[in-house]
Amino acid sequence: MFPSFPAPIERPTDLRLAALADADAFARYLVEHLAESGREGSTHFAPSRSLARIDVRLAAEARWSRRLDEALWGRTFLLTAGDRVLGHVELRGGRIPAEMHRATLGMGVLRRHTGQGHGRRLIASAVAWARDEARLAWIDLGVFATNPRARALYTRMGFVEQGLRPDAFRIDAGIAVDDVLMTLDLRG
């Protein structure tokens, strides 16, 4: 009989609001995450798989620096293990004053960390913050129609499908992807 070896110890994960000092780690993670879209058995979940890390970092810093009463503000919650980002959820504010009562949600988790409840934790944190801190009325999102796991998660978290944008994106040499529009009413 061979001795059993202990399972590798996973570092505990932390969930927190990103600070400007996190922008480079976030950019590193996001470039890695987007590269997983449509690869090695993953469903397509992003319109682009390649972004320049510097562009991601600069854009994140710009969004995170804006006040909540400024157009296109952004707040991101990071799922981390040590100094490594494993997932995120971001809320982005409206483009014009008339839509500042809404935010758009985008999120992701590195493939090897999916199926562990992290998506639910991330969304719950963003929703609580949007309702209690930012005092938003609605959260909107778009999800690829071909991503049933994400659609099911959003539905479980209270988002309601509002419509379909056919042929919203053309990815990987012209594959047409429909975008499902979903909303969460925070007023209740």
Image (tube, grey):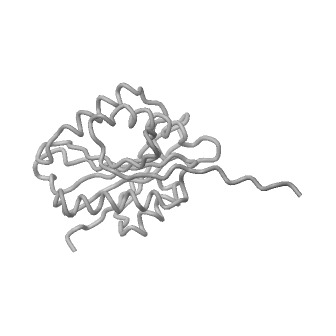
Q: Is residue 169 left or right of residue 69?
A: right
Q: Considering the image in quadrants, where does the N terminus appear? A: bottom right
Tally of marks? 0
What residue is shown at x 15% (from left), y 48% (from top)?
68
x and y percent of residue 70 in the render? 12, 43
Residue 27 vs residue 103, the one in the foreground: 27
* Residue 168 percent coordinates (x, y): 41, 46
Give whichever of 23, 147 is nearer the camera.
23
Q: Horizontally, is 10 left or right of 68 in the view?
A: right
Q: Position of residue 120 (x, y in %)?
A: 43, 62
Residue furthest toward the bottom? Answer: 188
Q: Is residue 139 left or right of residue 100?
A: right
Of residues 46 and 31, the one nearer the viewer is 31
At horizontal 41% and vertical 57% (from top left) the residue drawn is 180
Q: Nearer the viewer, residue 117 or 2?
A: 2
Residue 121 % position (x, y): 40, 60
Residue at 36% x, 57% y is 181
**x 20%, y 42%: residue:** 72
- Quadrant housing the C terminus: bottom left
Q: Is residue 73 shown above or below 135? A: above
